Amino acid sequence: MLRDGVDQYHSLLTDDLAGETQRQLDEQLQQRGLFFGDRALCTVLRPRFLSPAQYRFLQKRGAVVLRAFRTAHRAALSDAKLLAQFGLMDWEHQLVHVDTGFRDASPVSRLDAFFVAGEGGMKFTEYNAETPAGGGYNDVLTEVFYGLPIMREFLRSWDVHPLPARHNVLHALIDAYEQWSGTRNRPNIAIVDWSDVPTQSEFLLFQDYFERQGITCSIIDPAEVTYTNGELTGPAGKIDLIYKRVLLHELVERGGLDHPILKAFRDGKVCMVNPPSCKILHKKASLAVLHDERNSFLFSNEEQEAIDLSIPWTRVVEERHTTHDGEDVDLLPFIAANKDQLVLKPNDEYGGKGIVLGWEVDDSAWQASVKTALAEPYIVQQRIPLPKEDYPSFVDGKVRFIERMVDTAPYVAYGDHVDGVLSRLGTASLLNVTAGGGSQTPTFIAERR
């Protein structure tokens, strides 16, 4: 944490200045649609500050870990036994081998990580390789914070630089389309998701950004799409490129494998980002594949070192022997006996659904969860210490500093490099805005003038 910058920011935040800042923040959240459903996206008065060295470390470590993910993905596509470790559904097996028309399985993605002092510096706990959200919110929230009264005072002695995300989404989409089409024509983009999802407000931010860049863009519910005579169309006409925000398993559950979008994709008549092949790395088992001693032969020395330092011990829940801290363990009895150090996660869920934190449940609940995890695709992961910082809020006319856990979620472009950071805050161990708690705050690189 950039302690001196945080301390100065907090010292400037008098009750009067905090009240003025909160009023302007509330106005801006309303005017700009910065809400997740009906909840304000940001509930704190300070952005996240990273030093240049912190951000460079995140980028360098992230790049090596991402290389390891890509190595595992390529190997899985040519090795059925390795692919089985990811726990794909039968219908996913049918789609992951379909040619996408471009290089990267996940042109836009996002890691979930925590800065951890003294334990390799950083732990990557998940990889959202399918439908990473928050980039639009992040960029507009950054603009809002630049204009707040408290920032006017802070900027007198500190340089702060934004970490935007929307430009990389647009570049990755257009790059994938140019590879797929073999042209440099501008595509008609459709942002596709259900009309009732709480992230609709973010789709509007992306639509506005794309159109200001000269790209035609519409927001479409999957039910509005038709596929006839080799052409995918929506209410606004032909669709060339799908910015897919709908989850594939929901699309298949509601529309089946013959949904027009999937038929057009299989026929090579529409470019889709991210494509079904992204599901391999999106599975939480991807971290188990990286960390499992059975697969160490896949990775270079540099990749293996980064895995050892930055991926928590993670295994698919199954009956087997494996290693833990260099010792052979019988996995199921080990899980049953060590709940206070372990987390159970469903292999393919979002928003914190189904996650069981062993230290927050009693033994009977843990044992029942282990049985569930054995019957369904689940992973088990080593507990990590969560970093905490004080963040100010304005409550009953006063500034209050509340300790919050801080999640670092770096955005990834082209599947190979970190550019931009989503920062999420929470007072509960499960840091997730979708799960109903927490706050997002913009992230800046800060240096004293």
Image (cartoon, helix red, strand yellow):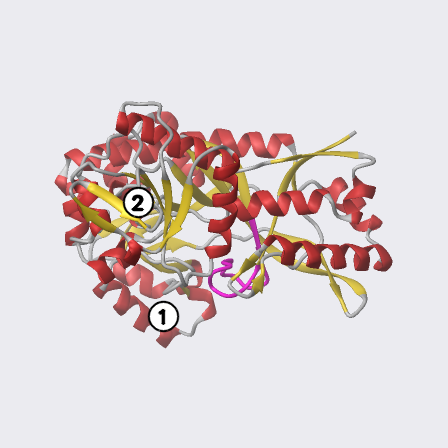
The residue under the point 25% across, 31% down is: 298
Q: Residues within 10 Å of mark 2 (few under 14, many from 20)?
A: many
Identify which amino acid the numbered label 2 is placed on. Answer: Ser
Identify which amino acid the numbered label 1 is placed on. Answer: Trp
**Which circle marks residue 286 in the picture?**
2
User: Does residue 349 lie above or below 7 as drawn?
Assistant: below
Q: Which residues are magenta?
A: 423-438
Camera-nearest residue between 167 and 88? 167
Quadrant location, the C terminus? top right
Residue 280 position by quadrant: top left
User: Does residue 198 lie above or below 326 as drawn?
Assistant: below
Q: Residue furthest top?
A: 183
- Is residue 116 left or right of 30 when viewed as pictured? left
Camera-nearest residue between 79 and 240? 240
- Dominant SS type (magenta): loop
Magenta highlight on residue 429? yes
Residue 224 visible from this viewpoint: yes
- Helix, strand or loop at label 1? It is helix
Mark 1 = which residue?
366
- Helix, strand or loop at label 2? It is helix
Mark-to-mark CA distance, 1 and 2 = 24 Å
- Is residue 86 left or right of 6 when viewed as pictured? left
The residue under the point 71% across, 42% down is: 146
Magenta highlight on residue 193? no
- Residue 408 position, x and y percent, is 53, 45
Disc 1 versus disc 2: nearer the observer: 2
- Residue 4 position, x and y percent, is 76, 40
